Structure formats: structure tokens, C-alpha cells
Image (cartoon, helix red, strand yellow):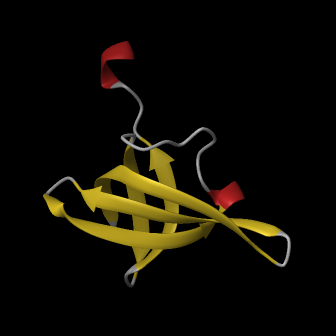
């Protein structure tokens, strides 16, 4: 499933010296609800920041991938 979303928060942390990020996001069609996912920091787009528009790919409710939405006006 593809979900358009906005990044609301990022919280990096370490588990056994491996970097992870707790990702907080709101879906474009439900901006009042904050969702969260935990991913390896290497699995997130480089330079991701609060306010970025993204597409979240999930399977059975589990976030598998996050991609930044490219600025359509620059295409």
C-alpha cells in the first residue's frame, strides 16, 4: 500500500550500536492523526526532515520503505 504523508518528527537512537529512527508522520488524507514507524536509519532518504512530503510503502500495516516526494514543479 502506498500512503502520501508528511514527516511530523524524527527521533534517532541506537540499539547495540546500530542507528534507528522513530518516524512520526501524518497521512495526507488524515492530517490530524500522527502515526509512527521504526526503521533503520539507512533505510530512510538521506537528509529527511520534518515537513518533507513522502510516500510510505507498507505491507500489512508495517512500514517497509519511505521515499521522498520529488518537487513536481522542478520536473
The x and y percentages for residue 47 are: 60, 38
In this picture, residue 44 sits left or right of residue 16 = left
Quarter in which the N terminus is drawn: bottom left
Question: Which residue lies most toward the bottom here?
Answer: 60
Q: Quadrant of the C terminus?
A: top left
User: In the picture, residue 56 is in which quadrant?
Assistant: bottom left
User: x, y percentage for residue 10?
Assistant: 50, 56
Q: Which residue is rendered at x = 30% and y = 17% of the image?
A: 73
How far across and how far down the image is residue 42, in percent?
Answer: 71, 56
14 is higher (above) or lower (below) than 4: below
**Going by the picture, which residue comes out furthest to the right?**
17
Q: Nearer the viewer, residue 1 or 48?
A: 48
- Percent position (x, y) of residue 50? 42, 44
- For this view, does 62 lie left or right of residue 16? left
Residue 17 vertical position relative to residue 67 in the rendered view, above or below: below
Q: Is residue 20 visible?
A: yes
At a point 68% along the width and 67% down the height, the residue shown is 13
Question: Which image quarter: residue 38?
Answer: bottom right
> Front-most of 20 and 3?
20
Residue 47 vertical position relative to residue 34 in the rendered view, above or below: above
Quick one: which residue is furthest to the top in this view? 74
Residue 75 at least partly seen: no
Residue under the image location 67 percent in, 59 percent down: 41
Q: Residue at x 39, y 47 (%)?
A: 54
Left or right: 18 with respect to 73?
A: right
- The image quarter containing residue 3 is bottom left
Number of marks in picture: 0
Amino acid at each position: 500500500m502506498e500512503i502520501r504523508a508528511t514527516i511530523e518528527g524524527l527521533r534517532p537512537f541506537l540499539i547495540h550500536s546500530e542507528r534507528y529512527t522513530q518516524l512520526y508522520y501524518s497521512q495526507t488524507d488524515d492530517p490530524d492523526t500522527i502515526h509512527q514507524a521504526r526503521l533503520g536509519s539507512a533505510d530512510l532518504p538521506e537528509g529527511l526532515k520534518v515537513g518533507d512530503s513522502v510516500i510510505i510503502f507498507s505491507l500489512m500495516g508495517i512500514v517497509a520503505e519511505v521515499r521522498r516526494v520529488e518537487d513536481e514543479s522542478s520536473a
